[in-house]
Image: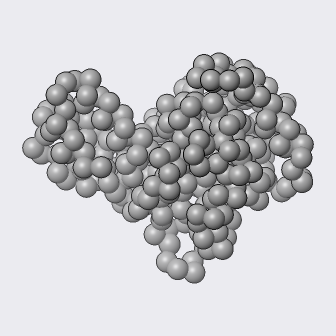
Amino acid sequence: MDVVAELARCATTADRYRLQIEAENELSPAEIDALHARAAGLPDASRDWVDKLAAMCRRIRDPIQPFRRRALAPEVSFFEGSAPPGAPRALVVAFAGVAKRMMLPLGPFLQGLPADRCDVLVLRDPDRLAFLAGLPGYAADLPALAARIATDLPMARYSGAACIGASSGGAAALAFGPLIGAGVAVSLGGLHPRGMPLRHAATPIDRYVFDALRAGTPKAATRLVCAHGEDFLRDCVRSRLLAMTVPGSEVLVVRGVALHGVVAGLFQRNALARFLEEVLLDGTLPADGAWQP
């Protein structure tokens, strides 16, 4: 996507907003950095948007993380990190929410992950059905998704895996983690699908697909975590109810965060990178169940 050229072709403000949302859901930190270097000739509104995106990435950590983007399918994006061949690296599988993002534009979210330690697979459900019906055109359900990923990516290169899901992607992350032997699976402000509206379903959806899947999956060593911001009461209730329905899961309270899905609150506290490294990549959780930014 040549964002500069596309912005120049936008005829209306609505066109520009649509393009900006699409770019925010796709661009890596390095692509945002390259866009920022070309932004001088853009109209003021577009330049301000690019400046803000670039500043968000720089605020999270420096230098810019050199993830390389490759599309595996229309809603499946693979971001290869910078670990040299043979070096230990993890595969992070991220399940986006209904806005097709991890509660932040994708570039800033990826900037929170060290490119020398992991590759990242970002999944977006175009039907906004919380991945209950898999990913249309790519995998019919979560077991098929695990098999498809093993086909599309050289899994032997990975020393481990981790799953993370934001909002409506949280339950899918918890169900998928054990399927790929992830060390940890984290739901950020997630809820059980029975509490989701799922307005875009063309036919009735089984909201208990993940429950049945867990019952039929051999017990794994995956650590299942339902995280929520301490001061966002709706997430507090939903995360605790989700934890009650997922055997073996635990609740993680993120202190001082009052926003849905945790990520944006961690960004505000300048703690996103530390949270993702400690909780997701290292699997290090506080003994008292409360993480302090």
Relative side of 89 to 227, left or right:
left
Q: Position of residue 237 (x, y in %)?
A: 73, 21
Depicted 149 relative to depicted 132: above or below: below
Q: Name which quarter of the figure residue 162 lies in.
A: bottom right
Q: Is residue 64 left or right of residue 273?
A: left
Residue ranking furthest to the bottom: 86
Screen quadrant of the C terminus: top right
Query: Who is closer to the viewer here, 230 or 82?
Result: 82
> Does residue 101 appear left or right of residue 5 in this picture?
right
117, 163: nearer the viewer:
163
Q: Position of residue 158 (x, y in %)?
A: 64, 70
Whether residue 44 can be seen here = yes
Q: Nearer the viewer, residue 47 or 213?
A: 213
Q: Residue at x 37, y 53 (%)?
A: 29
- Please say whether residue 288 is visible from this viewpoint: no
**Along the line of sight, the residue nearer the viewer: 197 or 24:** 197
Q: Quadrant of residue 169?
A: top right
Say how the picture is coloured.
Answer: one colour
Q: To which quarter of the image does residue 25 belong?
A: top left
Q: Look at 79% across and 26% down and name the residue there.
A: 241
Image location (x, y in percent) of residue 211: 83, 36
Which residue lies at the image location 67% right of the left edge and 51% below the top edge? 145
- Count the marks: 0
Q: Residue at x 65, y 58 (%)?
A: 148
Above-or-below relation of 215 to 196: below
Q: Where is residue 220 shown, x and y percent of the image? A: 85, 55
